[in-house]
Image (spheres, coloured by chain):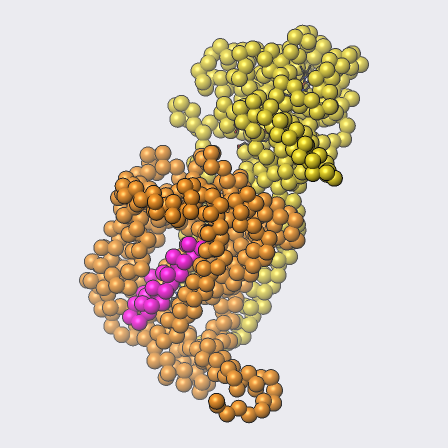
Chain colours: A orange, B yellow
């Protein structure tokens, strides 16, 4: 038992027991952030804030949602949307939040790629980030099942069917996942469990890990410059703020985060109130009907690019390509052979590779939704899918020959 | 400034992606093309009816005889429309209608004939004329009937042999059956005989009363099920509950579909209902009350929340400026 004095104030009482001021120093006032960063470095905080909003709105929805295939649709569309005060607001926040968080995730990922923030000490940040991407995908998919509308049902059907493994015809596995021959009550209740308990827990754990992985390597900066954080921090603390290359997270960097967040929430709530159909598909306001296949079945927009890698090939090749696409980005830190941590525009061919990747993923996204019956779209989709698959080996090649950039850029 | 350039790039790519997966993809998905691959534009005609859609459909199918028949039919409707009807004379003709439109909830040939209390208010004049000439042609479901007489209201064709008689009955409806109509009445008269609306507690038999005895509730439920069976037999399937339809279908779809169901679901058994603009607006209002009652609250609250965040961003900007003043 350590020695404890009687505390004279509540603050002191906590100080003795949990070391508030140390915590505050380590996490806030002396958590050093490079000064040379732009608003793209606020995306992580936007993600954390949006996740918070999803949790809060989700808790409200959870109070009235009924995980039963006979009651789910009406509990959402009638009870929550029209009987519960502001239920519609929580639902719209949750729906729009779940969709827009992926836009921010993609911006966050591409920022990491552009500035080379995934290597030379930052591999774990990247890997935990990718794990978050996968966890969020699962979270979004499971959540999409819950209103038990037409798209819930049919997307659930199509995606679980993928587990039959093409020619392996592993229908037993598919049934095991569904708990039934077709999506039904057992299917709904297990996805409910995943969505409100297991996956959020995993996500919270992963976010903590992601933040932890950031602490030692620190966040990157616009030039990819190596910074001696100790020395820079001393400069800052000595009042030489202009000369120092770093700033404390709180309150200095935080003030910028909060400003970016403010602008983001203007857009966010505009979407919540006036433009939500991209996130809450009208087709899902038709109740699930196993006898009536919708004219077009498509996943939410953020899954379209990988869906399109699956679609243009035969079923086996498609599945393999799809599998590769899901995993490919995990390996980025290891297939980028260049020693440079620098913004893409300083890395020769890499910058071309980067923009081709972005454009290719946008093309895949668009083709993933357009009807595949149109031969032009199908062809463009196929070319884009091949391009995506080729981008991996190409990256190894161009980064192997990348010239080392001299220090002090 | 570099940061603004980055904003511009991020916004440009986001907007491009949005455009491709939303407006563009939906346009491509719902595009209708004819046999030659030429896009068919499905447009609203402002809830007036002259048969042009029906004729074009027959022509697209290459059925020349049918197209001719429809042309002649709608030309005659236009002729009758020009006649001056006499409401007083029309009252006698209207008595014929009450033989079927009894307002007693009795099913007749598949559905309960609707109340005609606001028929002159919610339906288009030309449509009413067409309906009394030939119900199957008017509602563009003639493909279902070898002979119009087989339509549950088909025998009207034999009762209304005279053009002037039709003009008189329609004049009667437009004068005497055209009082103020509530959204609920419009729905009851135009859609309820086929579509339940459970969020408004409505079945094909009307509002479900509250029963003290469970037995009575069950007995009522059986009546509803029987009615639904009859409708199923008539329509080939049970028409969907419309509770959430206002969120499930876009404005354009609803307008063009109600004007002419065939334009969106070729071959469907749902007949054209013949609503005029006011009738449609009333029905839409009722469907919104059932399926999207928070629309108004949403639109009212929106500016406040957005305004709050504009203020928030402004203050945050000032704070940021303050925090960063000594850094460069
Ligand atoms: C919703 C989940 C996520 C949250 C809450 C989150 C949060 C954060 C935060 C707060 C930061 C530090 C600030 C910044 O640089 O933006 C950060 C950095 C980072 N994140 Fe994430 N992140 C998430 C998902 C991801 C994903 C999906 C990836 C990509 C695979 C990723 C990769 C990275 C990388 C590479 C960094 C370091 C950036 C640098 O050093 O400049 N994160 N994340």
> If the image is split into quadrants, where does the C terminus of chain A sit?
bottom left
- Give x and y (percent) for residue A339: 24, 68
How many marks are shown on the rendered structure?
A: 0
Within the image, what quadrant is residue A208 found in? bottom left
What residue is shown at x 69% (from left), y 38% (from top)? Answer: B214
Q: In the shown orientation, is residue B275 left or right of residue A30?
A: right
Measuring from the top left, give residue A137's x and y in whole percent.
41, 54
| Residue A148 colored in magenta in the image | no
Q: Is residue A130 magenta?
A: yes
Task: Please give the name of the residue rendered at 76% of the width and 14% of the height, measured from the top-left corner.
Answer: B95
The residue range painted magenta reads A113-139
Indicate left or right for A205 with A226 as reference: right
Expressed as whole percent of the image width and height from the top left, the position of residue B268 reads: 52, 25
Q: What residue sits 37% from the left and 71% below the top?
A: A213
Compare residues B53 and B262 and report the one nearer the observer.
B262
A254 versus A13 height, above or below: above
Judge whether residue A21 can be spotted in this image. no
Q: Is residue A294 above or below residue A351?
A: above
* Residue A56 seen in the figure: yes
Q: Nearer the viewer, residue B234 or B215?
A: B215
Q: Foreground residue, A285 or B258?
A: A285
Residue plotted at (71% across, 13% down):
B167
């Amino acid at each position: 038992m350590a020695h404890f004095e009687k505390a004279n104030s509540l603050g002191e009482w906590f100080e003795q027991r949990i070391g508030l001021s140390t915590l505050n120093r380590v996490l806030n006032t002396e958590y050093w952030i490079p000064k040379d960063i732009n608003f793209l470095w606020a995306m992580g905080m936007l993600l954390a804030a949006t996740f918070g909003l999803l949790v809060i709105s989700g808790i409200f929805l959870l109070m009235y949602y009924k995980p039963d295939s006979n009651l789910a649709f009406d509990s959402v569309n009638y009870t929550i949307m029209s009987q519960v005060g502001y239920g519609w607001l929580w639902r719209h926040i949750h729906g729009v939040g779940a969709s827009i968080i992926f836009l921010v995730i993609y911006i966050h990922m591409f920022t990491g790629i552009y500035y080379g923030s995934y290597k030379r000490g930052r591999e774990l940040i990247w890997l935990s980030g990718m794990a978050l991407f996968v966890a969020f995908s699962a979270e979004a998919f499971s959540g999409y099942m819950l209103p038990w509308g037409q798209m819930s049902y049919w997307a659930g059907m199509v995606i679980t069917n993928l587990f039959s493994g093409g020619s392996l015809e592993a229908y037993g596995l598919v049934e095991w996942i569904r708990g039934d021959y077709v999506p039904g009550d057992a299917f709904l209740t297990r996805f409910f469990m995943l969505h409100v308990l297991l996956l959020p827990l995993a996500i919270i754990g992963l976010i903590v890990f992601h933040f932890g992985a950031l602490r030692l390597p620190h966040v990157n900066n616009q030039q990819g410059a190596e910074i001696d954080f100790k020395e820079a921090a001393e400069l800052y603390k000595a009042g030489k703020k202009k000369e120092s290359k770093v700033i404390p997270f709180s309150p200095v960097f935080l003030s910028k985060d909060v400003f970016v967040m403010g602008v983001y929430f203007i857009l966010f709530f505009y979407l919540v109130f006036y433009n939500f159909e991209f996130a809450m598909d009208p087709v899902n306001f038709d109740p699930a009907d196993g006898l009536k296949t919708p004219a077009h079945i498509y996943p939410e927009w953020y899954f379209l690019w990988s869906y399109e890698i699956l679609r243009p090939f035969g079923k086996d090749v498609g599945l393999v390509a799809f599998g590769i696409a899901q995993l490919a980005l995990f390996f980025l830190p290891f297939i980028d052979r260049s020693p440079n941590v620098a913004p893409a525009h300083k890395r020769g061919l890499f910058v071309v590779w980067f923009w081709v990747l972005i454009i290719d993923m946008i093309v895949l996204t668009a083709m993933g939704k357009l009807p595949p019956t149109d031969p032009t779209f199908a062809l463009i989709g196929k070319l884009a899918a091949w391009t995506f698959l080729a981008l991996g080996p190409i990256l190894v090649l161009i980064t192997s020959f990348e010239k080392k950039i001299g220090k002090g850029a | 400034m570099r940061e603004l350039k980055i904003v511009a790039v991020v916004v440009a790519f986001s907007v491009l992606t949005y455009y491709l997966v939303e407006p563009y993809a939906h346009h491509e998905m719902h595009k209708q093309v004819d046999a030659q691959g030429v896009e068919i534009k499905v447009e609203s005609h402002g809830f007036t009816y002259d048969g042009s859609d029906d004729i074009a459909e027959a022509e697209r199918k290459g059925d020349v005889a049918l197209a001719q028949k429809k042309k002649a039919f709608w030309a005659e409707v236009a002729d009758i429309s020009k006649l001056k009807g006499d409401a007083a004379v029309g009252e006698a003709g209207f008595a014929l209608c009450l033989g079927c439109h009894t307002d007693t909830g009795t099913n007749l040939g598949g559905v309960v004939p609707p109340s005609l209390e606001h028929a002159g208010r919610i339906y288009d004049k030309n449509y009413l004329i067409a309906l009394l000439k030939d119900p199957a042609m008017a509602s563009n479901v003639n493909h279902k009937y070898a002979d119009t007489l087989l339509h549950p209201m088909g025998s009207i064709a034999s009762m209304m042999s005279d053009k002037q008689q039709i003009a008189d009955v329609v004049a009667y409806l437009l004068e005497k059956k055209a009082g103020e109509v509530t959204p609920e009445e419009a729905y009851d008269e135009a859609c309820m005989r086929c579509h339940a609306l459970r969020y408004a507690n409505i079945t094909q038999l009307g509002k479900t009363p509250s029963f003290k005895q469970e037995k009575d509730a069950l007995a009522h439920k059986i009546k509803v099920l029987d009615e639904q069976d009859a409708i199923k037999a008539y329509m080939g399937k049970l028409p969907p509950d419309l509770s959430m339809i206002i969120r499930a279908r876009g404005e354009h779809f609803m307008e063009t579909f109600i004007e002419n169901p065939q334009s969106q679901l070729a071959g469907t058994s749902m007949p054209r209902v013949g609503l005029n603009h006011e009738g449609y607006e009333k029905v839409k209002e009722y469907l919104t009350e059932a399926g999207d009652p928070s629309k108004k609250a949403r639109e009212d609250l929106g500016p406040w929340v957005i305004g709050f965040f504009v203020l928030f961003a402004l203050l945050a900007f000032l704070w940021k400026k303050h925090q960063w003043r000594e850094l460069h």
